[in-house]
Amino acid sequence: MARVIAIANQKGGVGKTTTAINLAGSLAEHGHRILCIDMDAQANLTVGLGLNPRTIERSIANVLIDSNVSLKDIVLPTQTAGIDVAPSDIDLSATENTLFSAIGREHALREAIAEWAGEHYDYILIDCPPTLGLLTINALVASESVIIPVQTQYYALKGFNALVSVINQIRNRGLNSDLRILGLLPTFFDGRTLLGRDMLAELKSMGDHHIFENMIKQTVRLGEAPLVGRPVTAYATSSEAARAYRGLAREVIELG
Ligand SMILES: Nc1ncnc2c1ncn2[C@@H]1O[C@H](COP(=O)(O)OP(=O)(O)O)[C@@H](O)[C@H]1O
Ligand SMILES: [Mg+2]
């Protein structure tokens, strides 16, 4: 059965989507079959894996609101061997409201995965939107674990407690009692600056959470990635960014 991992942080621009794409790329290099699920109406994951949202007829939005649409109806292959995507489109922004009036609304994604994807993939990575709304809750209810990218900049930890509190509520209310934080992933790291090092110390003070050893440095390689439509492991295969994400994949595999 697939391991299901959400990549979440309600702050935008911290490297969630970049991590989903490149962790997928690195896991695929190990021969694993990966499904990336795009839960953000901005569709950056969909585009970042080389798909054109304008050509997408049905998206994850359809799966979430219509029980007659299965994940298998919307999943598409990408240009990268081993990686499929459940695309998003702008319709997903309306889905949150529709879900609000539905029964069992927190479980829609979990049920969709159980129905089909769970046995077709080794890893399912869910890229969350920059909110703590029902879409993120659906992702967290559907996942075994969550990776939290944290930008090592000022105010990076503002809001961290709110995210942990949502995770705890999901556990305690029985929505997903086994959900665990796999680790915090420092992103945009610049070890040359005091700020970067201070942030790391602060991250360690945030509680008893695993901090991934393979921190992601700030690099133009990743800034240009959204235009390429493939993981950095595929187009800049020996770059430092590719090595870091490969290291992250090893840690994720080891953490089980
Ligand atoms: N380590 C990094 N160094 C430089 N640019 C990065 C890095 N990680 C991500 N980016 C760029 O920063 C922007 C935001 O990253 P993204 O992964 O989309 O964040 P999120 O999904 O959390 O909103 C994107 O343009 C991305 O290409
Ligand atoms: Mg994103």
Image: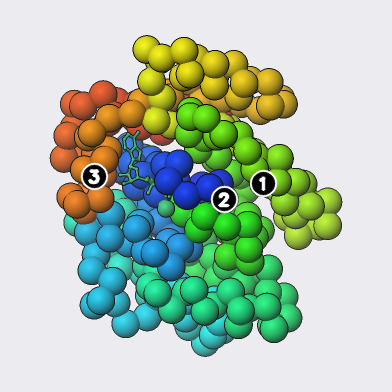
**Disc 1 residue type?**
Leu
**Disc 3 residue type?**
Ala
Residue at 35% over, 56% down: 45
Q: Of callouts 3 and 2, which one flags the residue occurring earlier in the amino acid sequence?
A: 2
Q: Position of residue 93 (x, y in %)?
A: 49, 74
Looking at the picture, does residue 71 appear above or below residue 155? Answer: below
- The tag on residue 225 is 3
The answer to whether the residue labelled 2 contacts the one labelled 1, judged by CB atoms less than 8 Å apart, is yes
In front of the other: 31 or 19:
19
Q: Position of residue 207 (x, y in %)?
A: 72, 26
Label 3: how many Cα within 10 Å (few below 14, some 14–19, many 20+): some
Q: Give the farthest residue toward the front.
A: 154
Q: Which of the 4 image quadrants contains residue 146?
A: top right
**On the image, numbered disc 2 is attached to which residue?**
10
| Quadrant (top left, top right, bottom left, bottom right) of the C terminus | top right
In front of the other: 72 or 222:
222
Q: Of callouts 2 and 1, which one flags the residue occurring earlier in the amino acid sequence?
A: 2
In front of the other: 60 or 153:
153
Give the alpha-carbon distance from disc 3 to disc 2, as whole Å: 22 Å
Q: Which of the 4 image quadrants contains residue 217?
A: top left
- Secondary structure beneath dot 3 equals helix
- The tag on residue 163 is 1
Q: Which of the 4 image quadrants contains residue 107?
A: bottom right
Looking at the picture, does residue 29 appear above or below residue 243? Answer: below
